[in-house]
Image (tube, rainbow, N blue to C red):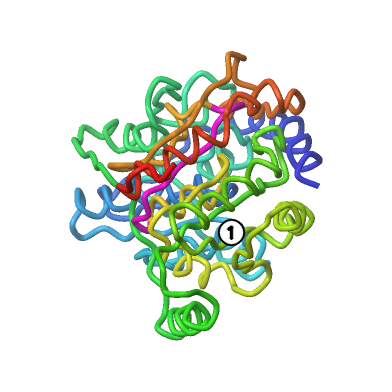
Amino acid sequence: MVGIQRIIDKYVGYLIIVILLVFRILRKKRSGRRKFLVIKLWALGDSILTLSLIKGIRESFKESNIDVLLRTKVKDVYECYQVDHIYNLDSPADLMKLVSKYRYYDVVFDCEPYLNLSAILAFFLGNERIGFSNQFRSRLYTKTTGFSKQQHMIQNYLDMLRSLGLQYDTQNLERLSVSGFDKTKVDNYLSRSTQGKTIVGITPGVAESSKNRMWYEERFAELADRIIDYLDCDVIFIDSPDNKKIMDGVIALMKQKPVNTLGIFTLRETFHLISKCTVFISNDTGPMHIAAAQGCRTIGLFGPNTPVLWGPYGTGNIAIYKTLLKPAIQNDKGIFREGDREGYMGGISVDDVFEAVKECLGTINKY
C-alpha cells in the first residue's frame, strides 16, 4: 500500500505541479507572520523531530498560531505536544475545512523530504512556503533550504526556520506529554510485571519499508539474556503489533523471561512506557526517536541509513554504525532499497551493543 501511494505521488503529483506552476504568481496580501502551518504526513520518528521546529516557531514568534497537517499514523505525536489545531488528511471533514483556507497561512513549512503531495498542499495553503531544494516540486516554494546529509535531520528542519532570518538551535528533542490515565495504566502494569529493577527497553523490529535496517533476532535474544543475567535489569520488549512474528521469534530464542508488551498499550501509552526505561535499544525506526525524546539513554543500531542524519538526538545517546556499504535509503529522493541485510547490519556484534548498554548504565564489567 505504501509503495502504491509513493508511485501515485510521484507521477500524478508531477503533473499537478506542472499545472500549478502557471499560477504560482497568485498571492494573497500577507498580513505578517502570525499564522503557521507545519506539514508532516508520514513517519512516526521523523514527526518527533519536527517538534523542535514547532518550538522554534513558538519562541521566535511569540503570538503565533501553529497548526499541523498530518495523516492518522502520526496524529498522536502532535496531540501529545502543544499545537493550536490539527488537520488530518485522512478525515473528509478536515479536508472540507482546508478547501476554504486558500493562502490562509502566512508561512507553511513542508517537512516532507520528497512528497509532491505536501508541496501541492503547501502551495494552496500558504503565502510563504518553505521546503527542501533541488527537487522538481521545489519550484512551488517561495524559499528553499538544502537537505544536508552531513548534519542531523533536526538541523535540516531548523534551517527552514533560519531561512526567515532567525537563529534558533536545540540540543535535545521535545518531550511528549500524555494524560494521567495513560500514565496510571502503564505504571500499574509495570508494578505487576517487573521486579522494580532498572528497565532496559528493546525494539527488535522496524516499520514496513527497508527491512534491511533490522538487526538479527538471535542477537537481540542473546543481548537481552546478557542484560538480565549480568546487569540485573528488567528487559521490556516494545514494538508494533505488525512485528509480532519478529518479537515472538526473539523471545523464543531467549533463556531468560523478558516482559513482552506487544499489543497491550496504545501509542500514547507507549510514549509513557518508553519514558520509564533508563536505557532503550532500537533499530533505526520510530521508537528510537521516541526514546530519545522521552529522556532515555538511547542506543540506535544503523546500517542502510547514516546516524549523522538520523541518529538518536541528544546528549549521551549512542549510534552504532559498522557497515562499509553506501546508504540504501535516500529520504530526499524517496528511495528505500531493500536487500543485503547482512552487509548493512551484520557488522554489529552483541558485544558492541552490550558495551554500549554498560556505558549508558555506568556499570562495571562483570565478566
Q: Is residue 108 visible?
A: no
Give the vertical position of 56 relative to 349 (above or below).
below
Closer to us: 360 or 140: 360
Residue 166 placement: quadrant? top left
The residue drawn where x is 42% and y is 22% is 148
Provide residue 89's location: percent of width, then percent of height: 62, 58
Provide residue 222's location: percent of width, then percent of height: 62, 46
Q: Is residue 127 magenta?
A: no
Closer to us: 250 or 23: 250
The residue drawn where x is 75% and y is 58% is 248
Residue furthest to the front in view is: 367
Q: Which residues are magenta?
A: 294-305
The residue drawn where x is 34% and y is 56% is 295
Q: Is residue 127 visible?
A: yes
Where the C terminus falls, by quadrant? top left
Closer to us: 150 or 205: 205
Give the vertical position of 32 relative to 133 (above or below).
below
Provide residue 7's location: percent of width, then percent of height: 78, 34
User: Left or right of 37: which side holds 345?
Assistant: right
User: Left or right of 214: which side holds 314?
Assistant: left
Q: To which residue does mark 1 refer?
A: 99
Provide residue 187's location: percent of width, then percent of height: 45, 80
The type of residue carrying mark 1 is Val
Closer to us: 154 or 356: 356
* Label 1 CA crowd tier, 10 Å (few <14, some 14–19, many 20+): few
User: Left or right of 62: which side holds 93?
Assistant: right
The residue drawn where x is 77% and y is 38% is 8
**Label 1: element kind:** helix
Q: How many marks?
A: 1
Q: Is residue 295 magenta?
A: yes
